Image (cartoon, coloured by chain):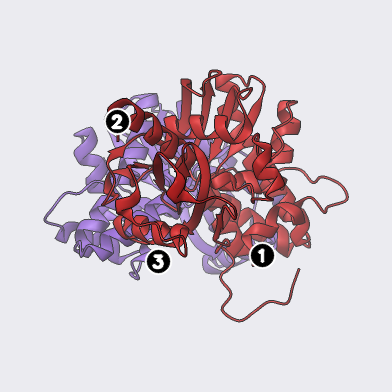
Chain colours: A red, B purple
Amino acid sequence: MGEEREGEEFWKWPESRWKHPGMDWRKGDIITSGIDVGSVSTQCVIMVDGELYCYGNMRTGSESAHSAIKAFTYATEGTGITVKDIHMIVGTGYGRVNVPFGNRAITEIACHGRGAHWMYGPTVRTVLDMGGQDCKAIKIDDKGKVIAFLMNDKCAAGTGRGIEVIAELMRVPIQDIGDISLSVEAEPPSLNYTCVVFAKSEATRLLRSGWSKEKVLAAYCAAMAHRVFDLLEKVTVDRDFAITGGIAKNKGIVKRLTNKLGIEACEQQWYNTTYRDLEAPFDTQIAGAIGAALFGKSLVEKRGK
Amino acid sequence: MITVGIDCGTRNIKAIVLQDGRIAGTSIVPAGFDTRADARRAFDEALLRAGMKRADVTRIIATGAGRKAVDFASDDIAIESADAKGIVCLLPGVRTVIDVGAEEGRALRVTADGIYTDCAVNERCAAGAGTFMETMARALEIGFDEMSDLYFQSTKEITMSAQCVVFAESEMVSLIHSRTPKPDIVRAIINAIADRVVSIMKMVGFENDVAAIGGVSLNKGFKDAVERRIKMAIIVPPEPLFVSALGAAYSGVE
């Protein structure tokens, strides 16, 4: 753990963006954009003929319309792309109806199914999307089409907001929680409570009784994994099993969850090897926006440009 | 005969000295990390107020979440039994009790003999407990006690869509930003907790008289919100925090 800085905000996860170094979007035939306005994060993806051109992933501000514009600007900076150049913009996520320049709005369940299918490959049958304020288990077919889904949006346990609360309480940067929790020598018993509010007081009690931060984080990640496991059990997990959303980045939760399930999760790497060769960062948070951009492409093909 | 009941809650530890069916002394201390030491302090303070010594006490009965830590107790009983016994001793006509504390909400059906016949608990989620109201009061920068007054000042009924305390906190921030008057926000918060409590009451069913005990019952807004939902009057006994400790003390007499 690094030196603690004054006024550091531990919940603030790093924003990210990427641009294809060798692609000229002007030569593309169909240019579409997917914008996923979530409660915690907003992603904008630009796809050229169904290939990923660039993306941006940011924290959602208090107003979803503004977040969509900010994410679009962030993703397209330096590319010369403007809203006019895009044939279809599809909004998704919690704030999807508030994308001011969006042509369509499609639910995040459909988009995450399709996006995971594109990112992880056509063998994916179960997608677990662990988002900022909800958690969804989605079953898809070999085309990435949703067959069934189940969602928990009532409780913060196992969601990004829940982890943010713990990051602040433990004064540990949110992106380090998973690794730190895995550094324990022996796995401690899980926290009794999955409720974030109770887990907070239980964690405080354990710290005062002499538990190390690592041990408390391990117990917390185990409790969150347990909560998500209960949701997954209701849909039965079929292989391949892919995890999307921000919490997919928390190895401490993912590992404990897959151990409990007895099913490995797909390795977080592009199905399309072009992007592996380009070393494009595999950002699990952009699956929804990718799905939205792909839906955009199908819509353009149907109606013509 | 002198008996002492000690109720080890997650927030406060309450002790009551009972002398031949009469309350001789009470005390309340905040629950810290050492439940045994805090229980001992509550016990000693209650004895001091009663003007008695440890040697005068025939039996000590512990109850509540931390009851097993009270190793100087003669015995311990489940909180449900203590609630049932305590309320019927105070208010013999009560047949349904809700006990809403800091981290738990409970609904009980009780007999005239002070025995509970059915019980439903919410202990897994903070949304139906005092912690919910406390967290919201803190975010609104008002005192827990102010909430009741604000509730009655509200002129407009709004509904919170979030159940979870964590989500409700963010929802409240956007309500504040959209300049929703504080009293209306407070009413939405109290309505939300009342909804949760009524949902556990429905699991056991309810009949008159209905009583409310525990820390949250001190909030008159909460009482009103539950009454509107169940369309029955609710009785809150004078010292609603001490009912479980009283029940424990009474059980020591038998």
Q: Quadrant of residue B142?
A: bottom left
Q: Looking at the image, can residue B129 be seen?
A: no
Cβ–Cβ under 8 Å for marks 1 and 2: no
- On the image, numbered disc 1 is attached to which residue? A172
Say which chain tag 1 marks: A
- Relative side of A52 to B91, left or right: right
Residue sitting farthest toward the left: B155
Q: Between A265 and A291, which is closer to the camera in this rendering?
A: A291
Amino acid on which disc 2 is placed: Gly
Of tags 1 and 2, the one toward the viewer is 2
Q: Quadrant of the C terminus of chain B?
A: top right
Residue found 71% across the figure and 27% down from its top: A261
Q: Quadrant of residue B253?
A: top right
Amino acid on which disc 3 is placed: Arg
Count of marks overlaid on the render:
3
- On the image, numbered disc 3 is attached to which residue? B138
**Number of the label disc, if any, that sits on residue A11:** none
Q: Between B105 and A80, which is closer to the camera in this rendering?
A: A80
Residue found 77% across the figure and 57% down from its top: A214
What's the distance in space between the residues labelled 3 and 1, CA to CA? 24 Å
Query: Residue A113, image x and y in percent?
Result: 50, 29
Helix, strand or loop at label 3? It is helix
Helix, strand or loop at label 1? It is loop
Same subunit: marks 1 and 2: yes
Amino acid on which disc 1 is placed: Val
